[in-house]
Structures are given as structure tokens and as C-alpha cells.
Amino acid sequence: MADWQLIADAAFSDLVLWVPKRTKLHSFAHARPSTAATLFYRDITGTVARTDWQKTIDQAWTTGKPVVAPTLTEFSGNASRISAYPVFEPDRAADSTPIAVITRHTNLGESRYPNKLQLNFVACAEQLLEMVSAGKFPIRESGSATRRGAPRVTDGLIRLDKSGRVLFASPNALSMFNRSGLEGELEGRLLAEAVSALLPATKHVDEGLPLILTGKGAWRTDIELPELTIAVRSIPISENDERVGAAVLCRDVTELRVGERELLTKDLTIREIHHRVKNNLQTVSALLRLQSRRIEDPAAAAALDEAVRRIASIALVHETLSNSTKTTVAFDEVLSALVTHSLELSPRMGELRIERVGEIGLLESRVATPLSLVVTELIHNALEHGLADSGTHLKIELQRYSNEGLVTISDDGVGLPQDFDLVTSSNLGLQIVRTLTENELQGELKLESTDKGTQAKLRFPL
């Protein structure tokens, strides 16, 4: 199904996939052509086949060979022709049975006298449907993953013979290469030679390009030409296990690739900015640390040390962002570094035990930065006050729900003073925590004493 849209477009027909369900074949999927009017204005997926289709479908299923209905059928007032093609596993054994049937419904109510383009498109579609019935399409090594800008039949189609010579080039395909500097027609020329003449001598060329342009390899790549970028995809055509030619799809993806390169450059620039911000913050931390060592007043030195600690927690977030192409932060990794850094500053480093429960996962940087500061302050407050003289256990519990996050930090220390009030507290760290929680995180913070010590609960929306 990842590859059958190109068949529908080339065949100017609707395709319906029928799979066995209980005792009957049911329609499982439907592809409408972008090149012609659809026969089915309403989806028929999930239904059983009409009586006048059933004989053709059953015959394809039982014989394992393509079947064209001998008579026309009528649907919604339009005459149509139906043909059925069995679907087999790749590289099937001779006695294997089908796994599904594809029916091709051609709307004859819109038909006109076929021109050269239509004849070549339909011939290509019929070859691919024959390959489906032989278990040779889709081609396994080509992969089924989609890529931005992948060429479609309507973008440009080139048919090659066995030697890689062009049998037919659609107007769109020819115009593309003419804009690249190709003179004259493509038909009758070796596609690989014609394209090679357009490539700059100094330009790096994909090693698989010659295989694609000769129709020997089932793959896709971009041709970087001076004026434009062309995405090409080759589909080798085989009959009776012998390669007889190829269909090459091409599309002008110049603007798309330029946009992708600009996005990549933007991502790299943002990562570099985060890296430089981290370096600048570390420089500021080092200067403050040097200054604190020169100050004799213990209170002033302690204030500078607290500033160093806060700056370091912000730098950790920027360091994480500089190592990632995403705008989200793996906060659990940041928390591990914050805990280690806080323990190193604690005078009771070897006596304390920190327990972590749960994970919070990826957070947007606008949430991760203030959250790291808030968590740093709460951990430091627990180590400096709650566990300064008594208690040995600090527990950090992380919980993530569909619309909010919850961080609980508890200790078995001395607990809060009896007259403690978070709103009126003069503690600078707690003032920072309350401001960041309310203004940046749009969350809620509760500090309370428990039977075993102190518990801080931080709840914020995601």
C-alpha cells in the first residue's frame, strides 16, 4: 500500500485491495487516482464485492493470474472496466496462494482518445501490476519508507529500455532537464550519459546514481545540478524474472531541499548559541567563585556561592540543549547532574542517601530551565536546613501525567519551624522558588512538615 498510489496515478484508475475475511474477500483499502476522475465518490472500504465483480475477483484468486473482465460494468451511472490482479508474498513459490487481490476500476465515462502520454502511463501501470501478480513488486531493496519530496508519476516519468535508453519522457520530466541545461529531446538517448553531461566536474556524485539512471537499481536519490535539485527514483521492470527496462520518476525539489538546508543551518545555529551561553555562564560562575574566595565576610561569600550554584543549574540545561537537535530537554539527565552537584557542596556528603523514584521525561526548554532552578533550590534547602544536623535520607519523586507534572522532595530531617509561612519567608532561595513556580511554571508549591521531616510538592501544567 505504500507504493500503490503511483500505480493508480499511472493507470488513471481506482485500485481496491481485497483481503480474505471469514469466507469472503472484503475491501481493505482504496487508492484514488490523482490523474483522472475517481469512479468511487464514496469510500467502499470494508464492504464485500458486488456480484458483477465477484467472478473476476474469484478467478484471479483461484488461478493466481491477472484477469480482465470480458464485459463492461456500470457504477453510479458510469461505464467502467474491471481487472483483477492477485497479490503474492515476495519471491513466492510456484505453488503458493495469493494473500490478497487488487482490482483496477477504470472510469470510462471520462475517457478520451488516448494520447502518447496516457498510453505510456497505462503501459507502465500494467507492467507494475503484472509484477505484483508475480510477487516482484514492490521491490524489497527499495524500501517502503516515504521521504519528503519523493517523486510521483505526475511530477515526471521516464521509461527506459533494458540498456537504459529513454523510450519515453513525459513533458514535465523533459522540461525539468531542459531547465538544467539539457538541449533537445531525451528520447533515444542514454539517460545516464545525458545526466552526466549536466553534472559539474567537481561535484560529488552519489555512487548509486548510475544504477538508478540505467534502471538497474531500485532506489532513489537527489541529483544536485547547478540550477536545480531533482529527486529521482528508479523502478526496474521485469517480465518472467528478466529485467526488460525501468520506470524513472523525477521531481524538482529545489525549493524543498533549500528549505531543509536552511532548517538544518538554523538548528545548528541554535545549538551553537546554547553552547556559547553555557560557556558564558560557566565563565561567570568561575569569576564569582574567585571573588568569593577573596571576600572575608562569610555571609557575602555564602551569597556568592549560592549564586554560583544557581548559575550552574541554568548552564546544565543549556548544555543539554547544545547536545541535541531537539528543543526538548531530557530532564531526568539534568536532575542527575543537579543532585550530584548539590551533594558535592554538602558538608555531610558521605552521610546522606538520596533516593530517586519515577521519571518525568522530555520537557520543553521554557519549562526545563525554571524547573531546574526550582528543584536545585529545594534540594539545597533540604540539605542546608532540613538535613544539616540530623536525618540521612532525601527522596526525590517524579510523576508525569497527561496534563501535569509533579515533583515531590522529602527528607527525614528537623522539619519546618512552627511559624513557617512560604509567602512571608525571608529566605531568598524560597522567594526565588515561589516566584519561578507562579510566574514561569504557572504551577503550585506546597511545603509542609511531616512525621518524618519536611515535604515539598511542586505541581505544574504540561
Image: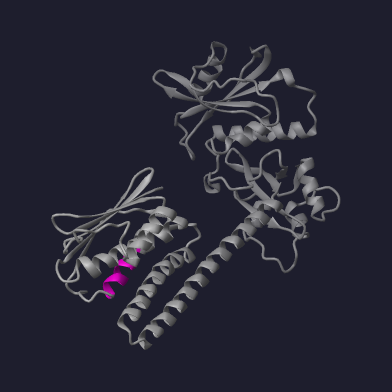
**Up-down: is 79 above or below 298?**
above
- Residue at (37%, 77%) from the top-left corner? 304
- Residue at (52%, 36%) from the top-left corner? 135
Residue 383 visible in the current orientation? yes
Determine whether, in the image, residue 185 is placed left or right of residue 31. Answer: right
Q: Position of residue 163 (x, y in %)?
A: 71, 49
Report the front residue among 443 and 351: 443
| Colour mode of the rendering | one colour
Determine whether, in the image, residue 144 is placed left or right of residue 152. Answer: left
Residue 222 visible in the current orientation? no
**Up-down: is 331 above or below 274?**
above
Residue positioned most to the right: 184
Determine whether, in the image, residue 409 is placed left or right of residue 435. Answer: left
Q: Position of residue 241 (x, y in %)?
A: 57, 41
- Residue at (19%, 67%) from the top-left corner? 387
Q: Would you say the magenta stretch is mainly helix, strand or loop?
A: helix
Q: Position of residue 65 (x, y in %)?
A: 55, 26
- Residue at (54%, 13%) from the top-left corner? 50
Q: Position of residue 246 (x, y in %)?
A: 67, 44
Give the residues drawn in magenta, as a range.
335-344
Residue 272 located within the stretch drawn in magenta: no
Residue 339 located within the stretch drawn in magenta: yes
Could you say which quadrant of the image residue 3 lies in? top right
**Up-down: is 31 above or below 163?**
above
Q: How many marks?
A: 0
Determine whether, in the image, residue 145 is placed left or right of residue 189. Answer: left
